[in-house]
Amino acid sequence: MTSPITTSDDITIEADHPFVTIRNAKSKYESSFMGYNDTLNLLAEKAGPDARILEVGGGRSPLGPGLGINHDRLTVNDISQKELDFLPDSATTALFDVAHPEQIPAEHLGVYDLVYSRSVLEHVSSVENSLRSTYSLLKPGGRALHFFPTLFSTPFVANKLLPFEATKPLVKALIGDKYERFPAHYAGAWVTSKSIERWESIGFSKVDPIQFFGHNYFEKITPVHKAAKAFNRYAEAKNITAMGSFVYLCLEK
Ligand SMILES: C[S@@+](CC[C@H](N)C(=O)[O-])C[C@H]1O[C@@H](n2cnc3c(N)ncnc32)[C@H](O)[C@@H]1O
């Protein structure tokens, strides 16, 4: 067994897991965000120095370059040319909708060793079709990691049900307005035994969702926050997967 990697944030990643397991963070919810960069570093390292890597929905500020995944081996995808126009001329970009596998330009099919995304699959028209795309984009043996929020965690159910414009003041009050917001659909963005079966039927040799429970969206409303925390602890202890708030969806072709 290889020794675990301890990060500066006191998160431990088990290096012998083909993807990741994160422990020792203050909460699982926090560890999913705090540990994501380390997770990607580990995956990129395992993919090797010559690996071709695709960041899906990287937008104006892809994660790769900040992690040392440089533009010589990184392609940044987005659905929006406006987002890709923010990138330096040296960036390799790919404009396509990840939820439409049939629209992916042929030069991207079967060429990537690693495909990843953060906070993208909640915005697509179909998670399942995005996973079909992921399968098509990967080389045999290639790996993917999609990190996204999942239903039926309460804040995301509310975000799905309420009109986008109507949620603006609420989101501003709860978490501020420092982030650009994109409409979220959560179309198939949940983890149940049925969804795992469907994702497996795409053809992946491994479908391994690592789930996180809890969130901080209600932190400013103490009684609600406490109640939500207790409920999420219960859901986690009972492994009620449909109540998870975020997932690292680990895939292997
Ligand atoms: C919330 S932002 C996340 C940006 C970045 N991944 C991050 O974590 O900071 C969502 C990004 O996904 C892109 N996006 C939304 N739907 C997409 C789709 N169907 N295919 C590819 N990109 C998409 C958006 O244009 C936007 O850049």
Image (spheres, helix red, strand yellow):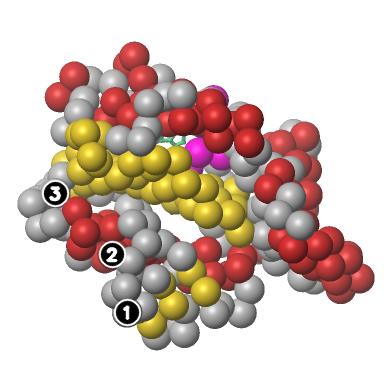
Tell me, for residue 124, which label it has, or none: none
Q: Ligand 1 is located in which of the four quadrants?
A: top left
In primary-sequence order, the first of circles 1 and 2 is 1
Residue 140: % across, % down: 21, 34
For marks 3 and 2, give the CA distance: 13 Å
Report helix, strand or loop for mark 3. loop
Q: Residue furthest front?
A: 1
Residue 149: % across, % down: 60, 48
Left-right relation of 196 to 85: right
Give the residue at mark 2. Answer: 41
Left-right relation of 24 to 90: right
At horizontal 47% and vertical 78% (from top left) the residue drawn is 11
Q: Amino acid at mark 3?
A: Ala
Query: On the image, which quarter does residue 107 sit in?
Result: top left
Give the residue at mark 1. Answer: 3
Q: Nearer the viewer, residue 11 or 92?
A: 11
Q: Residue furthest top?
A: 102
At horizontal 38% and vertical 82% (from top left) the residue drawn is 6
Q: Is mark 3 within 8 Å of ligand 1?
A: no
